[in-house]
Amino acid sequence: SQQGEEDPQALSIQEGENATMNCSYKTSINNLQWYRQNSGRGLVHLILIRSNEREKHSGRLRVTLDTSKKSSSLLITASRAADTASYFCATDAGEDGNKLVFGAGTILRVKS
Amino acid sequence: EADIYQTPRYLVIGTGKKITLECSQTMGHDKMYWYQQDPGMELHLIHYSYGVNSTEKGDLSSESTVSRIRTEHFPLTLESARPSHTSQYLCASSELVSGQPQHFGDGTRLSIL
């Protein structure tokens, strides 16, 4: 069964607005990662948050992790048209590490 | 951008043909992965490798096979392609140490007629 589930499935916002995407998962994890996928391309790693971390920042990205609720959120501030993409969360729960289980993704459209 | 390359980018081929999808990385990563992704859907792990001569099946059953004779090369083969194999195939690599991000190629979009 799917480990990560994201909502919303799709999000459409105006340039300059903030975008928030949520991810829920089922089992204990080592870390949770967020990736971006532009149309027709591979995934690009955005940020990794470990199970003992609660919040992490990278540029305009802010990720939170709540292990008690088994959920994470990705906030993109001051969005740009170039942020238009699909965003996936992925959980690393295995003993050998680096074996990821991906959610179905959130499609973000930023209108200029 | 990461140095991981997949060829071909697009392949349209008839049923019953043997297909090899190529994946190469220049980062010296020990771990490599193959994922299958249908349009608008999540990625499913079909094969992975810890290093040379190591191959493991992933979470999604697949009729494809892989080999890892060289660190930088992780090809995926379908002996007899069927329409059900139509999908996008993504290759990725990562360091052997746990908790490292994966680096992805741009994928091969495969259509079996």
Image (cartoon, rainbow, N blue to C red):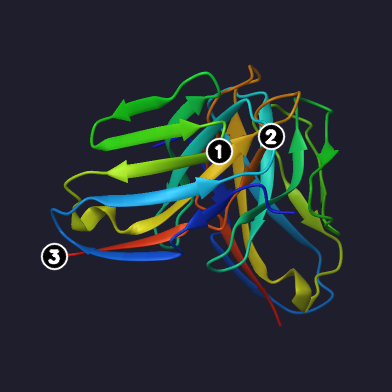
> Taking the image as drawn, is residue A38 in sight?
yes
| Front-lying residue, B110 or A94 | A94
Residue located beneath label 1 in the image: A69
Labels 2 and 1 within one chain: yes
Type of amino acid at the residue the image marks with label 3: Ser
Q: Is residue B59 above or below residue A52?
A: below
Which comes sooner in the sequence, label 2 or label 3? 2
Name the image quarter holding residue A75. top left
Labels 3 and 1 within one chain: yes
Q: Are marks 2 and 1 in contact (CB under 8 Å)?
A: no
Which comes sooner in the sequence, label 3 or label 1? 1
**Circle 1 chain:** A
Q: Label 3: how many residues lie within 10 Å, few (<14), some (14-19) or many (20+)?
A: few
Q: Secondary structure at mark 2?
A: loop
Question: Is A89 on the left or on the right of A2, as rendered?
Answer: left
Q: Residue furthest bottom?
A: B113
**Circle 3 chain:** A
Residue located beneath label 2 in the image: A99
Residue located beneath label 3 in the image: A112
User: Which percent across, then down, holds residue A74?
Assistant: 38, 42
Seen at 47% across and 32% down, the residue is A65
Q: Secondary structure at mark 3?
A: loop
Q: Secondary structure at mark 1?
A: loop
**Circle 2 chain:** A
